[in-house]
Amino acid sequence: MSSKTYTEIHNQYEALAHTVEYMCERRDSCAKLYNNGCFKQVVVIGSGSSYHISEAVAMSANLRLGLPSAALTGGDLMLHPEQYAPLFAGRTLAIFLTRSGETSELVNAALCLRSEFKNTVVLAITCAERSGVANMADFALEIPWAFDESVCQTRSVTNLYAAALIFIGIASGCGEIIEGYRKLAELGNQFLEKIEGVAESVSSLNWKNAVLLSDGEGFGITGEAALAFNEISLTPAVYKHLLDIRHGPIVLVDDSTLVIARLDQEQFSYQRDLVCDLVKRGAHVIVVSDAEVPRIDGVYANLTFGCSLNQGVVNAIMLPVAQLFSYYRALKLNKDPDKPEGLEAWIKL
C-alpha cells in the first residue's frame, strides 16, 4: 500500500524501539533535570493529538510523582494565561508535547511562560529537531524518526506518549515503564498483524460512529484514539470510561455504532455485564486487552496484545487499533486517509 498513513502506522514500533533506547541514553540527564528542579507542580501542554497525550501524562505525573499536575491546551494557555497563573505560581515543570514544535498556539504559550512565569522550567518533547518550541525550552528531547509526514498523527503519537511517560518513569524511579515500552516495541508488529484482518473486515460492517472505552492511568490517550476516527476517516467518535458510558451516552449506542473497549481482568464481571448491554443494543463490539480475558457472547472480535503491560503503558494498545480501523474505514468510504479535507498537519495562526 502506498499510503503514508498506512506506512507510518506500521512503522510505529520500529520507531518506538529507537525512542526507548534514546530515552535510556538520556536517563541521567532526565533524572538530573527533575531531581534538581525542586518542582511543586507539573503542567503538560499540547494541542490536538498532543493534548490528549498531555491528559494521560498529567495523570501519570499525579500518580507517580505525587505532585499536583494538570493538562492544558496550548490555545487555552495562549488566550487565558491569567486564569492559569496559580498553576505556575511555584516552581513548575512545564512539559510541551508537539510533533512539529511549530504549532502557533504552543509557540505562543511557550513565549508566555518565558515572559510571565519565571519559576517555570520548560521541557520540550518534539518529533522535529531545532523547532521553535524546543529553542525556547530549558531541556529538549527530540525524536525525529517518529515524525509523521502525513497530516494525521499515528507514529508520532505513540512515540511522543512513550517519551513523556518514560520521562515520568525515570523521574519517579519506575523502571517498569521502560520495560513495558520495550515489550510494546518487541511485540507491537505481531499485534498489528492480529488487528489488520479484523480492521479490514469491520470496515464493511454497517456502522456510522465509534465509541472508545477504557479506564485507568492512561485514559487520556483514548481521546487520541477517538480523534483518529475523526481525522483519518471523518467518522464521529467519542471516548468514555467503561462504566461511565451508562450515565447518558449509552442511549446513542445502537446497530450503527462500533464500540472498541479495552478490558482487563480486574472486576471483570462488571465489564462483561457492560459489554453484554452494548451487544444487546446492537453495537458491533471489539474487545482489546493486554493479557487474555474471557470471551463474551456477541463480541465481534477479541484483540489480545499477548502479555501483561504496566498500567501506565497499557492504554497505548488502543492507538494502533483505532488507527488501522479508521484507515480501512476511510478506504471503504472512498476518502484519502493521507489528506482529510479541511485539516492541516499543524496550525499556523
Image (cartoon, rainbow, N blue to C red):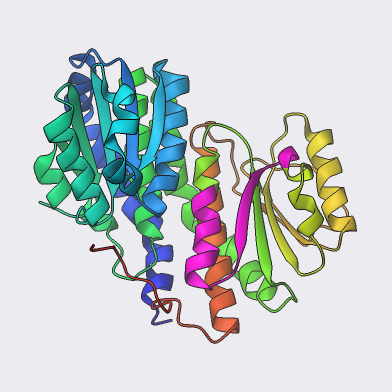
The percent coordinates of residue 273 (x first, y second) are 86, 42
The percent coordinates of residue 257 (x first, y second) are 74, 65
Q: Residue at x 62, y 55 (%)?
A: 238
Vertical placement of 232 versus 266: above or below?
below
Report the side of 24 relative to 300 (left or right).
Answer: left
Quarter location, residue 94: top left
- Does the magenta segment cover residue 25? no
The quarter of the image holding the N terminus is bottom left
Q: Residue at x 57, y 58 (%)?
A: 321
Vertical placement of 179 versus 152: above or below?
above
Quarter location, residue 166: top left
| One can see residue 148 in this view | yes
Quarter location, residue 23: top left
The quarter of the image holding the C terminus is bottom left
Q: Residue at x 37, y 39 (%)?
A: 72
| One can see residue 295 in this view | no
